[in-house]
């Protein structure tokens, strides 16, 4: 959901980033849409009387070899269904070129309280399990599930030449609406694909990671995503400009997040709510959609990207929740080497300096997404998927750069092993035997560790796989590295840091990064290769490259409770355990495994003052240096637990 720039509320931005119009345009796609589809607009009354806007694109008579009837493929979005007007056609349409050319009734719906839809918008509108029925003269309760149900009922009755089947798809915020739409799902909904769905914002989705606020992405997003008076047409807003190319300096000079909130002058309660709800309180609990994924009667294909900087954990939580609450449901997880929505708008063959040796997004769109919707919505064999359901998990394995299928996720064969920290910066699956052992560093909030080694004013998606050599040279970053691997090591599933730490402060962050270190003789790309950080810069030397595989912060005051944080006692050792989102990565023979530990990751993450305070409102004098200690002895071992898949 969150990106490093403000939302540009115009058609092309929405089409490029979100919703059913997410794919890059194919040859003459705009002309194809004009000659093959007709457009209609409806304002559909919901059960509480509010009218929601939808635009409907139906195949023109004689435009397709298949004369229909056709299934619906719908997206619901808070980002606008522009262009408005039945005489105005979009430049892009549909989740993929394959589906567009196959023939569907494509539907885009403005979410309640956004753009041309009436009503009041709520951030991740909470699902209501037991709703008060809509009766005359009585209070009426609705949510995204009922809004979708009523929309589907209307479309089935009022749009001609439909086959009675409905599919729902959406990326990011529209992914949330997709998930919410299938709770207590309408019987006509036969296929749904929540893609990078916002699911539980306080836990490793857009809002907070490990209790730490995702600063620059959230602030950048909410400079454009604001409350609206509806119905309203999109404004042609300029992207948010921080006034400098150096986001690190901008956010450092801004001070506590309270100052960024005040800059809105009370005009954006959406950002305010993110800033002030610093614990896992009722605001967040009501917005944990994974708790409500029940009564789902449709085939579901949840999609995510290993390098999604916004909604990485959402796909896994959604997938597991559907399994838990809906035994026997058709429920598939698909994860590729993609950034946020990258499967819909890139080739998926690389991220920054890291290559994947295949156009993975093209494969996904043609061989996974297209067959899924064709099979469940048309029930024919054009899908190249004669067996019907996809495998339980269809995942790309980075490092080895191959697609894998599993009958469970994580794989049943994976076993838990811990990469332990040792003296001299060594990392090993062997437990420590030292009776004593500790590594110290000084963390200074006035000079936080940057999250990338180059100047940027946004959160570049490539940071998720970027080179970490710049951080390894800092005195406030601990580095632990394995011996050169003699055989491949594949890890699949969540990554769980388990630290024994102490601090001279009363609160601190501990950022743990799992890294793949390339051999020194690893070949570099040619000088004209893509992947350069800035125009005119030389490509990176890949020998010794330290590729980030997974990294997350953990705010120590939440070590015992997300609801009731407690201070550290200066010098007292405590356990700080965390769970990072899943990975599926092979560290190849000849590579090394590295773990880095630090106490800031700025401005990706807000600064911890290292004083036990409500961080958005910390005073300048409360930002203090702290000495951080990480223990590594037999009785106080620190390390990172991973799930290792045996080699075959």
Image (cartoon, rainbow, N blue to C red):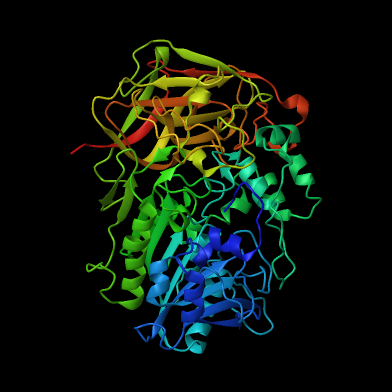
Q: 434 or 461: which is nearer to us?
A: 461
- Estimate the x, y position of residue 340 in percent, counting from the top left: 50, 51
Give residue 135's quadrant in the image.
Answer: bottom right
In this rendering, the answer to whether 465 lies above or below 36 is above
- Estimate the x, y position of residue 151 in percent, counting from the top left: 54, 78
607 left or right, relative to 634? right
In this rendering, the answer to whether 414 lies above or below 176 is above
Residue at x 26% of width, y 45% of height: 412
In this rendering, the answer to whether 65 lies above or below 276 is below
Q: 390 or 454: which is nearer to us?
A: 454
Q: Is residue 188 visible?
A: no
Extreme residue toward the top, this view = 435
Q: Is residue 158 visible?
A: yes
Give residue 293's quadrant in the image.
Answer: bottom left
Residue at x 48% of width, y 28% of height: 468
275 left or right, relative to 422? right
- Estimate the x, y position of residue 372 in percent, counting from the top left: 34, 67
- Estimate the x, y position of residue 586 in percent, counting from the top left: 31, 36
């Amino acid at each position: 959901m969150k990106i490093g720039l403000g939302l540009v509320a115009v058609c092309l931005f929405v089409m490029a980033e979100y919703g059913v119009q997410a794919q890059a345009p194919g040859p003459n796609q705009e002309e194809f849409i004009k000659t093959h589809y007709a457009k209609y607009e409806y304002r559909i009354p919901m059960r509480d009387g509010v009218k929601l806007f939808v635009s409907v694109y139906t195949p023109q008579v004689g435009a397709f070899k298949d004369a229909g009837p056709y299934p619906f493929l719908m997206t619901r979005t808070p980002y606008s269904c522009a262009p408005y007007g039945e005489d105005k056609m979009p430049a892009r349409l549909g989740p993929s070129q394959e589906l567009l050319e196959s023939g569907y009734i494509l539907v885009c719906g403005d979410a309640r309280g956004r753009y041309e839809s009436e009503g009041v918008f709520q951030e991740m509108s909470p699902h209501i399990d037991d709703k008060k029925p809509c009766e005359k003269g009585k209070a009426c309760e609705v949510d995204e599930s009922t809004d979708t149900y009523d929309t589907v009922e209307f479309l089935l009755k009022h749009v001609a030449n439909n086959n009675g089947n409905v599919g729902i798809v959406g990326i990011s915020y529209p992914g949330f609406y997709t998930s919410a739409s299938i709770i207590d799902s309408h019987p006509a909904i036969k296929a749904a694909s929540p893609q990078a769905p916002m699911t539980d914002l306080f836990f490793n989705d857009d809002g907070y990671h490990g209790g730490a606020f995702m600063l620059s992405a959230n602030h950048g997003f909410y400079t454009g995503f604001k409350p609206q008076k509806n119905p309203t047409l999109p404004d042609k807003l300029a992207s948010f400009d921080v006034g400098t190319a150096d986001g690190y300096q901008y956010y450092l000079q801004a001070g506590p997040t309270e100052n960024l909130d005040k800059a809105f002058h009370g005009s954006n309660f959406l950002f305010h709510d993110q800033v002030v709800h610093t614990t896992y309180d009722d605001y967040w609990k009501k917005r944990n959609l994974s708790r409500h994924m029940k009564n789902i009667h449709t085939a579901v294909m949840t999609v995510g990207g290993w390098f999604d900087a916004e909604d990485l954990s959402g796909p896994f939580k959604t997938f597991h929740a559907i399994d838990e609450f809906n035994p026997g449901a058709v429920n598939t997880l698909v994860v590729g080497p993609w950034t946020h929505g990258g499967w819909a708008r890139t080739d998926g063959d690389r991220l920054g300096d890291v290559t994947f040796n295949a156009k993975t997004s093209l494969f996904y769109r043609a061989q996974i997404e297209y067959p899924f919707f064709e099979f469940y919505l048309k029930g024919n064999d054009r899908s190249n998927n004669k067996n019907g359901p996809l495998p339980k998990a269809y995942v790309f394995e980075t490092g080895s750069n191959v697609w894998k299928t599993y009958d469970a996720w994580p794989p049943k064969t994976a076993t838990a092993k811990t990469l332990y920290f040792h003296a001299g910066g060594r990392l090993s699956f062997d437990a420590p035997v030292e009776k004593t052992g500790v590594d110290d560093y000084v963390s200074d909030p006035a000079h936080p560790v940057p999250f990338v080694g180059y100047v940027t004013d946004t959160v570049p998606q490539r940071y998720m796989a970027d080179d970490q050599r710049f951080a390894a040279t800092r005195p406030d970053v601990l580095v632990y590295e394995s011996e050169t691997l003699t055989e491949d090591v594949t890890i699949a599933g969540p990554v769980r840091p388990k630290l024994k730490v102490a601090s001279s402060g009363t609160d601190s962050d501990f950022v743990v990064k799992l890294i793949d270190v390339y051999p020194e003789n690893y070949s570099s790309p040619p000088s004209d290769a893509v992947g350069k950080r800035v125009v005119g810069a030389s490509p990176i030397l890949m020998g010794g490259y330290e590729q980030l595989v997974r990294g997350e912060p953990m705010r120590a005051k939440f070590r015992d409770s997300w609801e009731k944080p407690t201070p550290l006692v200066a010098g007292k050792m405590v356990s700080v355990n965390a769970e990072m989102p899943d990975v599926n990565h092979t560290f190849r023979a000849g590579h090394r495994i590295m773990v880095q530990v630090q106490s800031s990751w700025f401005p990706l993450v807000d600064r911890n003052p290292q004083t036990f305070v409500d961080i958005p409102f910390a005073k300048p004098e409360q930002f203090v240096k702290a000495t951080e200690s990480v223990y590594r002895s037999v009785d106080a071992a620190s390390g990172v637990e991973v799930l290792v898949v045996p080699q075959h």
